[in-house]
Image (cartoon, grey):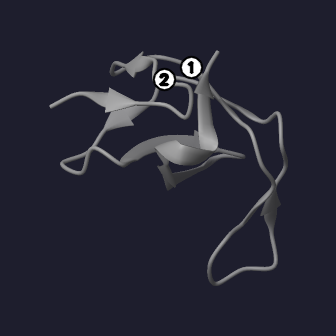
Amino acid sequence: MEVKDSNGNILNAGDAVTVIKDLKVRGSSAVIKRGTKVKNIRLTDDSAEIEGKVDGSVMVLKTEFLKKA
């Protein structure tokens, strides 16, 4: 299974990615700002999602809003 970012680059476990759009966090009033860097990502069973630590908490992010750093 290949996991690709918004530009079509292949993502691997441990890569760093950057958020390309302000994202609202479900169940919270927090917002992940554009340009936020997420380091040491983990791949999930779904090729459209990754796990990463943002501001100290682990979140699942859609790859369509990320680009490889």
x and y percent of residue 25 in the render? 68, 70
Horizontal placement of 5 versus 19: left or right? left
The single residue placed furthest to the front in the displayed view is 8
Quadrant location of the N terminus in the rendered image = top left
Residue 65: % across, % down:
61, 46
Disc 2/disc 1 C-alpha distance (Å): 6 Å
Vertical placement of 55 versus 22: above or below? above
- Circle 2 SS class: loop
Per the image, the residue denoted by label 1 is 16
Q: Are marks 2 and 1 in contact (CB under 8 Å)?
A: yes
Q: Amino acid at mark 2?
A: Asn
Q: Which residue is mark 2?
A: 40
Q: Nearer the viewer, residue 69 or 38?
A: 69
Q: Residue 36: x, y in percent? A: 78, 36
Q: Give neighbour class at mark 1: few <14, some 14-19, many 20+ (Cα, 10 Å).
A: some
Picture residue at 74% right of the left edge, 39% below the top: 20
> What residue lies at 62% left-to-right and 78% top-to-bottom?
26
- Going from N to C along the chain, the mark reached first, 2 or 1, is 1
